[in-house]
Image (cartoon, rainbow, N blue to C red):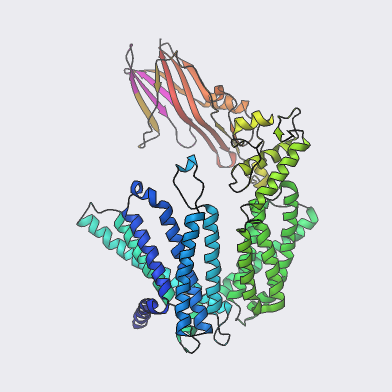
Amino acid sequence: MSTIRESITKSLQRAFLTFQTFPVVLASALGFTLVTLVRIWMDWPQQEPYNFLFNCLHLAFSMSAVFGLAAIAMVQVRYNEKKMFLAANLGGAIVGLVAFLLLTFFGAAEPRVSDLLVQRVSTLASARISVAIFISFIGFIYFAGKPKAKSDFASSLFMTQKAILIAALYGGVMMAGASGITGSIQALLYRNMSSKVYMVLAALIGFVAFAIFVGYFPDFRKSSQDAHREVAQKQPRFIEVLFEFIMVPILLILTIVLLSWAVKTIVTGDWPSFSRLFGIVSSYSIGGIWLTMMIAKKETDIARFYHRIYPIALLVILVFGLWALILQLNVEGLRSQEYYFALVLLTALASGILLLMKKEGAYPKIAALICIMAVVSVSPWIGGHILPGKIQLSRLQTSLVNEGMLVDNQLIPAEVEPSEEVKIAITEGVNFLAYEDHVNLPEWFDEDLSNRDVFESKMGFEQTWKGVEDDYPIPDRETMGMYLTMPGASIDISEYDWAIYLEKDYQGPSRIQTVEGNNGSYRVEWIMGERNSVPSIKIWIDDALILEEDLRAFMDETAEIVRSRPGAYEAKAFEEMSYRMETPELSILMVFNHMNIYVDPSQDIIDYNLDLNALYLKEK
């Protein structure tokens, strides 16, 4: 118990001393916290004019803190002079100021109607600042791993992760305790306590947790012999077991699976969906390289085997990933997903080669390579925000010219309907470009071209999409279904006396509404139904039931009409989403927003679901 108490006390003491060892870092974190507290104090209508300013301050303080962390670590490791220490702190402050000015004058997004004209930091500006913060953080890890006699990059990386986890643990416990105490006060003593109290606690405890994180690191000065460095870099026994005897076998089994897939692909030529391949190969590359660093100093048989086999397996798997990327580019061109997969592939390929050649010496070079790719991803000419859009625009123009739909920079509806493949390519290209903010679109590209009706009038055919099953194969279990939505429509309701909108009864599956007519009081009950049931309607006049009907027949009839339309589709006509009924007392029209039928024979499940928009009544 005394050991735990001593450990906690030392962590808090180190957090307090951080103000002396990393002053600009803690000052920036304090500034970040103060801005957060101001935002908590101000309600949104009052905060709205300052939203852009607050966002700029948050990003600038974050930049200043992380850059200052790296700069101070560098001067302590290399110079250990007071004037250089002051220069590093001043440099952190200047970098934060420069970031703030750049964001303020060049980082605003163009206001749109959809943004309610609230000025905000652009996604690209945020991404570029985030990349700068990331590179600064990698720089800190690099300098924290110096000199070679005391540390290395892999040990520094583990120490940093350990510091993050310890700070998160302490912060989480403090937040849980403070929230419990505050909740007790609110429940027992002061019920009108504002929820902002919890927000303030979270902001203050977040600052303390960050101080604990920074304070966990040892003294990096060249002349220092801080014994805490060895403790901070040491992996606890349970972590060693986790890495060597749990995570390494998992990665090795995944390696076997991926190599088996490679062999299967050679034999059958059958490729999985690109989206899934992207996720699997990226996770294998990133996770495997990280694990290589975590077990860099392990001398067990399984660790040595992993170090020998992983780089080779990685290169083999990445060759197939590269092949898949080339096939994907030939079919759909370069889009955001393909762009970032290409960056991951290039980084992982170079990393695999470095691991084979340099062993442990490869780790800093891999980190530098990752930083370079991060810069490339936000660069002005070949960044992920610009290059995919340029290539997609070129592909779209080529397709339109080949189909005779783009002549003298004028868009002409197709005289002959293009092939399914071309229609899909044009549809996907238009919808991709419509949401790209950084591509200069030509005059013929209408800003509403992605709208279904505008697209059809300009192109001469409906938007056509690749089937969902192309990317996400339907599972072996046989299921059937239909999902329809109401199309845009105008209807004449002059012949009806009442339009009834039924409020959802959250205590049960029914919606009930009453209307007074000339012949009595009508009570309408719309019963949504539970699982394996069918929506139904009941209508009473006074206490007499005049209508009770379920809508199974209507839904089955509609399903028969649209049976040739798999997946989620819009209804083709208003009649598919409306139902008329007659009784001696009333004429009834029901209009629906959505209709869904789901059948799973293996589970004996049949779900009928109707979302009722309105019910129209005419008294006879």
Res 362 visible: yes
Whether residue 527 appears in magenta in the rendering, the answer is yes
Q: Residue furthest right?
A: 267
Q: Is residue 10 above or below residue 111?
A: below
How many marks are shown on the rendered structure?
0
Question: Does 48 lie within the magenta span?
Answer: no
Q: Nearer the viewer, residue 112 or 225?
A: 112
Q: Residue 569, located in which quarter of the rendered image?
A: top right
In the depicted structure, whether residue 581 falls above or below residue 608: above
Residue 352: image location, x then y, percent: 69, 70
Q: Nearer the viewer, residue 443 or 587?
A: 443
Q: Is residue 510 left or right of residue 405?
A: left
Query: Could you tell whether 125 is left or right of 185 in the image?
Result: right
Relative image position of residue 201 (x, y in whole percent)? 32, 62
Closer-to-camera residue (196/436): 436
Is the residue 446 above or below the residue 393 in the image?
above
| Residue 278 in the image, given as x and y percentages of width and height | 65, 56
**Which picture quadrant has residue 264?**
bottom right
Give the side of residue 442 with respect to residue 47, left or right.
Answer: right
The residue lying at 55 percent from left, 60 percent from top is 128
> Relative to 218, does residue 198 appear above or below in the rendering?
above
Q: Position of residue 186 (x, y in %)?
A: 24, 56
Task: Specify start and end residues of the magenta stretch as a single range.
Answer: 514-543
Q: Is residue 217 visible?
A: no
